[in-house]
Amino acid sequence: MTNNSSARTALAPQLPQAGMSMVSGEVSSTLLDLTIPAQLKQTVRKFGARPAMVFREQSVRWTWAELDREADQLAAALLAMGITKGDRVGIWSPNRSEWVVTMFAAARIGAILVNVNPAYRLAELEYALNKVQIKLLVTAATFKTSNYIAMLCELAPELAHRSPGQLQSVRLPHLRTVVRMGSEITPGMLNYADLMKMGTPDLMARLDAITAALQPKDPINIQFTSGTTGNPKGATLTHHNILNNGMYVAAAMRFTENDRLCVPVPLYHCFGMVMGVLACTVFGACAVFPAEAFEPVATMRAISEEGCTALHGVPTMFIAQLDHPEFSKFNFSSLRTGCMAGAPCPIETMKRVNTLMNMREVTIAYGMTETSPVSFQSSTDDPLEKRVSTVGRVMPHLSCKIVDDDGEVVPVGQRGELCTKGYSVMQGYWDDEARTAESVRDGWMFTGDLATMDELGYCNIVGRVKDMLIRGGENVYPREVEEFLFRHPAVQEVQVFGVPDEKYGEEVACWIVLKAGQSATEAEIREFCKSQIAHYKIPRYVHFKAALPMTVTGKPQKFVMRDAMIAELGLKVAKTA
């Protein structure tokens, strides 16, 4: 029996013991002991002629063998540019074929892929590039309202006077090479197509020996996750972390090589990269990317025309399709399963997905970047009641517990902080021992999420220990936005918090106290944010106050502000699963 087939047939977790909220996943299946390039080669041997990746907007269709050749060509080219094991290679792009090729190429030679959020603006980009010392960046030219080339030239004006691969920048001291997509020429940058030509036969011949020396527990991926104390943290993940998590997510959906997964979620998230690309890689399934970013009609058309059997998305994506006036024009009969994650799912939405989209085996998943990401997932045959009211049960080879403020496991049904332990827990936050130690204790990842567990081991996420909010599947940490808003010359005090929103689940709101003699408008505050922080972090509601509600010890009372905003704006708190 192969590893992935054993994963598919033995997923039942153990039940909580002695009425306490602690449970372990089954261990009868076998964890993969492979690197990502080794797994890709194995998939090519089994399914080389089968479809692997479809990028509809680019008219790119690759079999597994063709994808493998593209990745090897780029891996050899990266060697030509001086990239070696452990070097950080950044990818800043929406969902394009170059993203997936860069991911596999970097892994082939042991370089660490750094996922740069496509929504990042100047301040965030500069921080990310420098924090993990990205040596080579593969970038799109533009995306939506973002001009990536212009931003990079603003941060590194030296590009205009340097040869490609020879950058020496004051603000980006570690970046040496910028590789741009598209055919347009930008001084100091190398075109992706030209880079690919640099992978000579001699360099290609070196790849197998390099890959053979890699270890499954080597770091291979850095994903930035916003922090409650300001700057984003670089969660560092290994081959072992993400390859196995992708396998078990796919196993829970009962994937085979005959499945075709529609992936409208972003590749820079674990949702797209791990639960999408790597999940398909282990089982030889095909990943279909409808567009560069989520668009309801493009997604529905891809499902209908490509015969997709599975669909991923956050609840807002499913709602956007179900409520679209053209919904009835598309054929969803091929759909069977998929994964809904990233935010609480409204009960009525789940019921409509089951019936109107034919996804009777859709699964719910819960996790976080730091756990690669999924630690709980429902199964395809779980009762509907469990799929609309919980996030499923613990994944194989993982242990989870719910603890009180003293770190003691709480009884079944009692809320506390959810903790995860096992193969999926990150190696740590890049170059940040202090914040790693705060989050990972004795091997347990303290998630910051409040949860309950029932007597069958099903978990329900009921809140957050800290004040993170989730807008349309994107984590927004108020402290990060507050730190940025403090840069505005008129701002004396600011508090950022979430308020309910029917479309996005939550929206960003802020209360601001202005400095004496200073003035500002809502529009000015938003404009101040626009070119510097991601669009989903920009406050939708900006209210100016004479003072902020505080506790007797001087701590801001965000729950008071949130309740006041809900009442003032007449917002509804949606009933969720």
Image (spheres, rainbow, N blue to C red):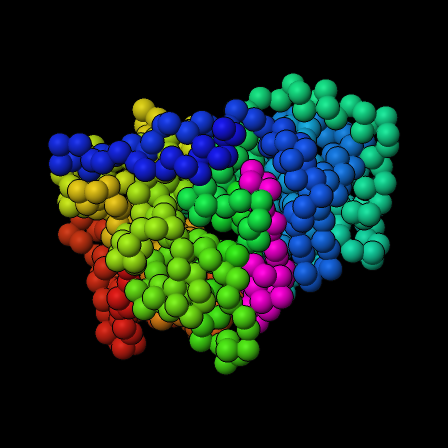
Q: Is residue 482 found left or right of 464 in the rendered image?
A: right
Residue at position x 44%, y 76% in the image: 323
Q: Residue 440 vs residue 558: left or right?
A: right
User: In the image, is residue 476 above or below residue 418?
Assistant: below
Image coordinates for residue 186, horizontal then vertical, percent:
81, 53
Of residue 233 and residue 83, the one placed in the foreground of this image is 83
Residue drawn at (17%, 32%) of the image: 17
Residue 262 appears in view: yes
- x and y, in percent, of residue 577 in the image: 28, 59
Please state which of residues 90 and 130 is positioned toward the viewer in this rendering.
90
Give the residue at x 27% y 77%.
570
Q: Position of residue 329 (x, y in %)?
A: 55, 78
Q: Is residue 137 visible?
A: no
In magenta segment, residue 291: yes
In the image, taking residue 50 as reference, residue 455 lies left or right, namely left
Height in image: 570 above or below 460?
Answer: below
In the picture as drawn, the residue positioned furthest to the bottom comes out as 325
Q: Nearer the viewer, residue 392 or 553?
A: 392
For the point 48% across and 70% down, which residue is it? 321
Q: Foreground: 162 or 426?
A: 426
Q: Quadrant of residue 110?
A: top right
Give the x, y percent position of residue 477.
Answer: 39, 52
Residue span colored magenta = 280-308
Residue extending farthest front:
1
Residue 433's quadrant in the figure? top left
Please give left or right for residue 70 compared with residue 25 in the image: right
Q: Is residue 206 magenta?
A: no
Count of marks placed on residues: 0
